[in-house]
Amino acid sequence: MTQRRYTRVVLKLSGEALMGEQAFGIDPDMIKYVADEIYSIIELGVQTAVVVGGGNIFRGIAGSSFGMDRASADHMGMLATVINSLALQDGLEKIGVQTRVQTAISMHEVAEPFILRRAIRHLEKGRVVIFGAGTGNPYFTTDTAAVLRAQEVHAEILLKATKVDGVYDSDPVVNKDAKLIKRINHREALEKQLQVMDLTAFSLAMDNQLPLAVFRLRDQGNIKRVVCGEDIGTLIK
């Protein structure tokens, strides 16, 4: 049996990841794919929490650029993350994975409120916990929420599943000679201004020495490979 390196992890997914090949919304095939990938590490006994973005439905910072009040736009973005969280919960439960959605904004009819001790208890019982509505505060991204929740539940690593296969020294879309960075520490990444995540989130991870693994989501089996300690993507620690 494959041996896990980590016992408790937080997985960060962008809302765009759930679009699949669509231009907007949620692709059912992508929900199933992500659910199967998460199931692969649940089988190893890895306690798993998930933070999902809402960019496939509404992005607060984009709304504010059109003249909408930033706080209102961010609250709309938080609600979009809850829609994605419920969709992912449905996908996981269809394959037999017990799942709980906890939200930073109270909405008792559809999800539990975020209560740290309850979240940890769910993880200890082998349930997947999906954290929705970001931090519950405007002006903070879901990257920041992911780092915050990872610290709160004492996750050993934050897994950031992205469209690219790791962190590069420059934009690989613009520069064909961009080089993949396999290992780097937080301070070096900050000094080189590598776009791992927003500055608030990254500073919080650095201050608390939270390891980050950045890898490509669409390569099947990557989540399991990272959890088992394989040399996939970029490791920041």
Image (tube, helix red, strand yellow):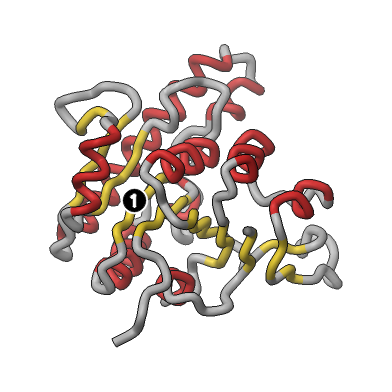
Using residue 96 as the reference point, say whether residue 107 is left or right of it.
Answer: right
Query: Residue at 28% of width from left, 73% of height from top?
Result: 44
Inspect this view and state whether residue 91 appears: yes
- Camera-nearest residue between 208 and 34: 208
The mark total stands at 1
- Secondary structure state at the residue bearing disc 1: strand
Percent position (x, y) of residue 138?
Answer: 51, 20
- Outermost residue toward the top? 69
Location of the C terminus (image quadrant): bottom right
Query: Residue at 46% of width from left, 29% of height from top?
Result: 77
Location of the N terminus (image quadrant): bottom left
- Camera-nearest residue between 181 and 62: 181
Percent position (x, y) of residue 104?
Answer: 34, 27
Q: Which residue position is annotated with label 1?
A: 49
Inspect this view and state whether residue 29 appears: no
- Camera-nearest residue between 63 and 154: 154
Using residue 141 as the reference point, say whether residue 134 is left or right of it.
Answer: left
Percent position (x, y) of residue 227?
Answer: 43, 70
- Compared to residue 102, the image places residue 17 above or below, namely below
Query: Residue at 26% of width from left, 44% of height from top?
Result: 120
- Compared to residue 62, the image places residue 159 above or below, namely below
> Which quarter of the figure has residue 103?
top left
> Which quarter of the figure has residue 83?
top left
Label 1 amino acid?
Answer: Ala
- Camera-nearest residue between 35 and 223: 223
- Compared to residue 123, the image places residue 198 above or below, namely above
Query: Residue at 83% of width from left, 52% of height from top?
Result: 192
Using residue 162 as the reference point, say whether residue 151 is left or right of it.
Answer: left
**Crowding near the residue tagged with mark 1, few <14, some 14–19, many ≥20 C-alpha atoms within 10 Å:** many
Percent position (x, y) of residue 161?
Answer: 51, 59
